[in-house]
Image (cartoon, rainbow, N blue to C red):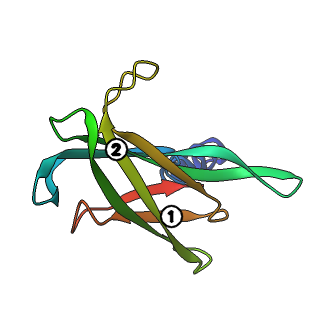
Amino acid sequence: MRPLCAVVALAASLVWAAPAHAQSAARLPAVPVVASPTCAGQVSTDAQVVPVQKDYRVSDGVRVAISYDAGVYDGSCSLTVTADWTNLDTGGSGHEDITAVSTIDGHYGFIGYANATFAPGPGTVVITLSSHPGDEMRLTV
């Protein structure tokens, strides 16, 4: 094999072996939920990598947000969703409860919006939500 062909073959193999791009955001579509006997509706979820501060350090973390639409906007309907996370690289895990009240928020324009932020450490993080059984969101932090 000529030296130039060897260089081209090596370069081509490195391109195919390059790591996949990190996914920094994920979304789960709206699903029906029943928050109580008198409050039903839909909830959708988003997750994204965001800066978080822990003590005096800022590092990458994850923000999980829910948008809850109960069709009733007087504050009488609330929904609590549990976000469980696992860092596949470090083995770390945790959970946060996120509670949204179905009201119209003129500032953000969402109905029943709430979020939680956590610091899972660097690696691939899998997030599951009690509102979306069997679904997961994967982010690379």
Q: Position of residue 116 (x, y in %)?
A: 52, 52
* Residues at marks 1 and 2, CA–CA distance in whole angstroms: 27 Å
Compared across the picture, whether 5 is left or right of 57 comes to left
| Residue depicted at 63% across the width and 53% down the height | 61
Q: How many marks?
A: 2
Q: Position of residue 52 (x, y in %)?
A: 70, 49
* 30, above or below 109, in the image: below
**Which picture quadrant has residue 90?**
bottom right
The amino acid type found where label 1 is placed reads: Val
Q: Residues within 10 Å of mark 1 (few under 14, many from 20)?
A: many
Q: Position of residue 70 (x, y in %)?
A: 18, 41
Instruction: Identify residue for label 2.
Output: 101
| Residue depicted at 10% across the width and 53% down the height | 38
- Which quarter of the image is occupied by the C terminus? bottom right
Dot 1 falls on a residue whose secondary structure is strand
- Residue 27 seen in the current view: no
Compared across the picture, whether 67 is left or right of 120 comes to left
Instruction: Check whether the beta carbons of the residues at disc 1 and disc 2 lie within 8 A of each other.
Output: no
- Residue 2 seen in the current view: yes
Q: Position of residue 3 (x, y in %)?
A: 66, 47
Q: Nearer the viewer, residue 128 or 26?
A: 128
Instruction: Determine which of the numbered discs, if any, sits on residue 125 in the image.
Output: 1
| Residue depicted at 60% across the width and 64% down the height | 123
Instruction: Determine which of the numbered discs, if any, sits on residue 66 in the image.
Output: none
Q: Nearer the viewer, residue 96 or 124?
A: 96
| Residue depicted at 46% across the width and 19% down the height | 107
